[in-house]
Image (tube, coloured by chain):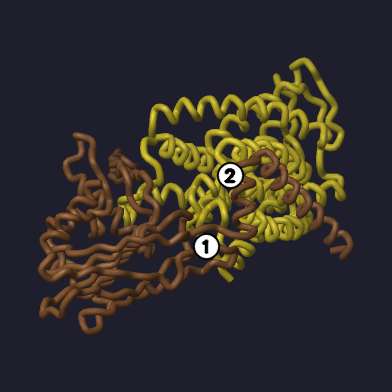
Amino acid sequence: MQIYLPIAEVSVNAFLLLGLGGLVGILSGMFGVGGGFLMTPLLFFIGIPPAVAVATEANQIVASSFSGVLAHLKRKTVDLRMGTVLLIGGLIGAALGVVIFNYLKSLGQVDLLVRLCYVVFLGIIGSLMFVESLRAIRRAKNPGTAPKRRKHNWIHALPFKMKFRVSGLYISVIPPVLVGISVGVLAAIMGVGGGFIMVPAMIYLLGMPTKVVVGTSLFQIIFVTAFTTLLHATTNFTVDIVLAVLLLVGGVIGAQIGTRIGTRMKAEQLRILLAIMVLAVCGKLAFDLLVQPTELYSVGVGGHS
Amino acid sequence: MIRLSILFILFMTCQAIAQDIVGGLSQKRVAITARFEGSEILIFGAVKRDAPTEDNVEVIITVAGPSEPITVRRKSREFGIWINTAAVEVDAAPSFYSIATTAPLGEILTNTEDLRHKISIPRAIRSVGAPQTIADANTFTDALVRIRKQEDLYQLNEGSVSLADQTLFQTFITLPANLVEGSYETRIFLTRDGEVISTYTTAIDVQKVGLERWLYTLAHDQPLIYGFLSLFIAIAAGWGAAATFRLLNL
């Protein structure tokens, strides 16, 4: 069934979009990522103009993360306090990121930079997670070697300590705020919610339990993407509500299913799957950069850019 | 004004056997609804004459969507990766362009006339200054035409106009689903020995209607309300799905 999108001004297959939304929604609920880094390239591929794809995707993520968070709240796997601290850092970081993005844009080649950013970050995060979760799985099989986690280091000497009961942490607020800021900066530059950077950062840098990480990540993604949606809607007029509805119907259902799959899996399995997914996206992007494209030319609307 | 005077001169030179073209459209308005899947428009008309003539005339019909500036970029390999290295700006390229003719375009239209009336696809694209650093600027416009032809946005249908008794003609123009709003200028040319001897111009009005129109207007006139509406739908859908799953106890 073809539907004409009023803002994107293209005609698309409604069922295809419902399916895409559902697929990305499942991943979102399982891993606590928004799924923007997967969905945006898919939307480009089916012919949605890039500006509309990025803006509308943000709106869809609001829906699927909200759906996912409600499911996680029911299971008490959302650390609202940690989420709020991360969010404050994230918003500061996003504001900084927009400034940096505009500066890079004035230099040109921002597109390339974003792609390289993706490849480098996805590659590093993916491989680190992959190796770590593989070790964790092996450890689980040989229970002889006791896991050594939560070492006391300099992080615990920092001031402004706060209790994060759901995560079982008693740490200074400085590291979460810093994590929030750096993820915010990256997210703004790369045009995504930042879940796939935030999730590993929470697990490895803050030492939060994997189960809590997913819900907490989704919690802060809602606010970041809601803010992004409003920004795009008011400055670029690129949010396509019809496209968003098609995507989010699939997305919210997918997120519910994903959450249920996620809670039934072991933390290591969840992490290794996320690692594989991140590496796959990284591989695809690297492939596009390294292999000669079939069409060397591309057409962009508008003059000077 | 220039066009009018050219027409006038042409008219004067053809006084001996005045031939004029008149045309019509099956529909002057195309409404883009949510279920818009493209449209087919019948363009028809006749050649008016004072007296019978032995001359062979040909008909060329063009439909052009609104023009906009375009940037065409080319990738090349730098340090082992493929990146956009060169760009050429096209000052104005129609978002849609379709040509229908009675015979191969090269046989029924001279280069000079093509240049004057901007009929063929490369002529319909207006490209002035390419950067000095790019020597092969025309490969960029070729690429633009190639890409748009693949998307069915640029069409060249030679021989698709049927001309009966050198007088009545008709053709169908297919408008794809990916249409941009605006006025689509429709031109009908009558040629003899490659020279344009008469033209007829009209327009097809392509507009969004109903829900599409309402959303588009809201997004541009009340962006904040539109943004909040989008968020409201997102939150409501997210809550709805969660509530449904909870009720079903899955």
Give the amino acid type for the residue marked by disc 2 in the picture. Answer: Ala
Mark 1–mark 2 distance (CA, rounded to whole Å): 18 Å
The chain drawn in brown is: B
Estimate the x, y position of residue B162 in percent, counting from the top left.
27, 80
Looking at the image, the residue that sits furthest to the bottom is B165
* Amino acid at the residue labelled 1: Ser
Pointer 1 chain: A
Q: Colour of chain A?
A: yellow
A4 or B109: nearer the eye? B109
Residue B108 vs residue A198: left or right? left
Mark 2, residue position: A55
Image spot of residue B216 (x, y percent): 59, 50
Reply above or below: A156 against A200.
above
Q: Residue at x 19, y 34 (%)?
A: B132
Give residue B84's quadrant in the image: top left
Residue indicated by mark 1: A11
Mark 2 secondary-structure assignment: helix
The residue closer to the viewer here, B54 or B136, is B54
Q: Pointer 2: residues within 10 angstroms few (<14), some, or many (20+)?
A: many
Label 1 SS:
strand
Q: Residue at x 46, y 59 (%)?
A: B205
Q: Position of residue A24 (x, y in %)?
A: 63, 56
Mark 1 vs mark 2: which is more N-terminal?
A: 1
The C terminus of chain A appears in which quarter of the rendering? top left
Residue B55 shown left or right of residue A188 in the figure: left
Q: Estimate the x, y position of residue A250 in percent, counting from the top left.
A: 68, 60
Q: Residue at x 16, y 41 (%)?
A: B135
* Residue B52 picture quarter: bottom left
Q: Nearer the viewer, residue A95 or B25?
A: B25
Q: Chain of mark 2?
A: A
